[in-house]
Image (tube, grey):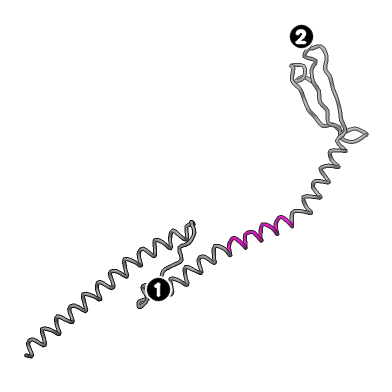
Amino acid sequence: MARTAWGETVYSTVASEAGLLRLITQPDTAARPITSIVEAATPLADMEQAMAGLNRALFALLPLGLLGAALGGVLLAERVLSQVRQIAQAAERVGRQNLTARLPSAGGDEFAARAASFNAVLDRLEQAFYKQVHVQVRRRKSSSARRRKKAC
């Protein structure tokens, strides 16, 4: 009551024969100094019943929510891992003799960006490889031509 005497509204819960009551104590601020206090109480039984019903509903739906979250996680992980498997399979096809194979880079996600980057590296590697092969072929031809010239 001391806080109420200073003009503050106070909420409290009290036990009575009827059960728990929610109590509001509020000063009559129309008069100065405060000369009266108004108190009102309401039983908490209805609120406790409503909260118990909400708790039962929550516990009944919790397993469904967890199942939905797990299923969503599995589907999302499968989608991501399928892209990783596709990239791994395509990368295995790229070998010493097959520099023309490329990784699938469709889509706008991070995997597509990495695949496009890897494909660009393969393009440069393929060009360098064929340049080197071309240089080696020219050297062999010129070496063969010189040997034929010397033989003649």
Is 40 or 2 nearer to us in this picture?
40
Circle 1: residue type: Val
Relative to 100, residue 12 above or below: above
Left or right of 41 on screen, residue 138: left
**Residue under the image location 81 percent in, 23 percent down:** 25
Q: Residues within 10 Å of mark 1 (few under 14, many from 20)?
A: some
- Residue 127, quarter of the rendered image: bottom left
Q: Position of residue 35 (x, y in %)?
A: 81, 11
Identify the image quadrant of the C terminus: bottom left
Residue that extends furthest to the bottom in the rendered view of this protein: 151
Left or right of 145 on screen, residue 3: right
Q: Residues within 10 Å of mark 2 (few under 14, many from 20)?
A: few
Left or right of 8 on screen, residue 72: left
Q: Position of residue 62 (x, y in %)?
A: 74, 54
Find disc 1 in the rendering and name its residue: 94
Badge nearest the viewer, 2 or 1: 1
Earlier sequence position, callout 2 versus callout 1: 2
Find disc 2 in the rendering and name its residue: 32
Q: Could you tell me which secondary element the residue under label 2 belongs to?
A: loop
- Residue 124, quarter of the rendered image: bottom left
